[in-house]
């Protein structure tokens, strides 16, 4: 198992649209394992393959309090959504930035599991937020893009200043 480097916003690779996974082979299973290890170590409650510079439709999620309910979703797609909720979000690709984002309150996501089996998961609350956040990543969208242009400019300036200091 190994920890994977996470791309930092505004890296242009975070804007790439991920391709569907064709065959679920040992390479995909190894990637999913490494993503889960990277997510737990960060720590985070979700991670998309885009964030580790692999542009395939694969996400891992664990929004449980006990940190023992890992979901690995291949080719996830939202097939139902309703309601609205506002939740504070952060992102492992945008460290130190947190803000409120409005998303659907409930989602039903269809996906393939690591054995290639078709599954659906119905989610509300934080798990619903996390699934939408991660599926956004596969579409090349980072949560800050839901914020105002002014907030995005301030975030870019803050991160650019941090990069100069740590360079
Ligand atoms: O970068 C990521 O995609 C992991 C995200 C997932 C996430 C963020 C906000 C809300 C739901 C999911 C996070 O870094 S995981 C850490 C976290 C958890 C809850 C709130 C804020 C940050
Ligand atoms: Zn994120």
Image (cartoon, helix red, strand yellow):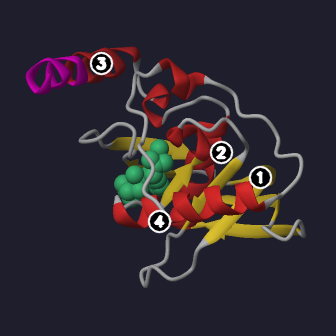
Which-is-in-front pick, marks 1 and 4?
4
Q: In this image, 54 relative to 94: left or right? A: right
* 55 to 26, vertically: above or below: above
Q: Residues within 10 Å of mark 4 (few under 14, many from 20)?
A: some
Q: Check the image and report above or below for 9 versus 119.
A: above
Q: Name the N-terminal-most of marks 3 and 1.
A: 1
Which label number is shown at residue 156? 3
CA distance for labels 1 and 2: 7 Å
Number of numbered discs visible in the structure rendering: 4
Residue 100 appears in the rendering:
yes
In percent of width and height, residue 106 lies at: 67, 60
Residue at 67% over, 32% down: 139
Crowding near the residue tagged with mark 2, few <14, some 14–19, many ≥20 C-alpha atoms within 10 Å = many
Residue range in magenta is 159-167
> Where is mark 2, residue-wise?
135
Residue 57 position within the rendered picture, expressed as x and y whole percent measured from the top left = 73, 44
Instruction: Give the crowd class for mark 1: few <14, some 14-19, many >=20 residues within 10 Å.
Output: many
Q: Which residue is mark 4?
A: 37
Direction from residue 21 to residue 17 in the image, left or right: left
**Is the Cβ of the residue at disc 1 closer than 8 Å to that at disc 2?**
yes
Q: Between marks 2 and 3, how big is the CA–CA gap?
A: 23 Å
């Amino acid at each position: 198992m190994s920890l994977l480097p996470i791309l930092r916003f505004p890296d242009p690779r975070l804007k790439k649209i991920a391709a569907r996974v064709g065959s679920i082979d040992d390479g995909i299973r190894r990637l999913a394992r490494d993503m889960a290890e990277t997510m737990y170590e960060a720590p985070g409650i979700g991670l998309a393959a885009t964030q580790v510079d692999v542009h395939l439709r694969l996400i891992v999620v664990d929004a449980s309090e006990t940190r023992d309910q890992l979901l690995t979703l291949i080719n996830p797609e939202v097939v139902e959504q309703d309601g609205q909720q506002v939740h504070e979000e952060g992102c492992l690709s945008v460290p130190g930035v947190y803000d409120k984002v409005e998303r659907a309150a409930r989602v039903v996501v269809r996906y393939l599991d690591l054995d290639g089996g078709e599954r659906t998961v119905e989610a509300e609350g934080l798990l619903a937020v996390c699934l939408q956040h991660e599926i956004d990543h596969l579409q090349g969208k980072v949560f800050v893009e839901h914020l105002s242009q002014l907030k995005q400019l301030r975030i870019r300036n803050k991160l650019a200043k941090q990069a100069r200091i740590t360079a």
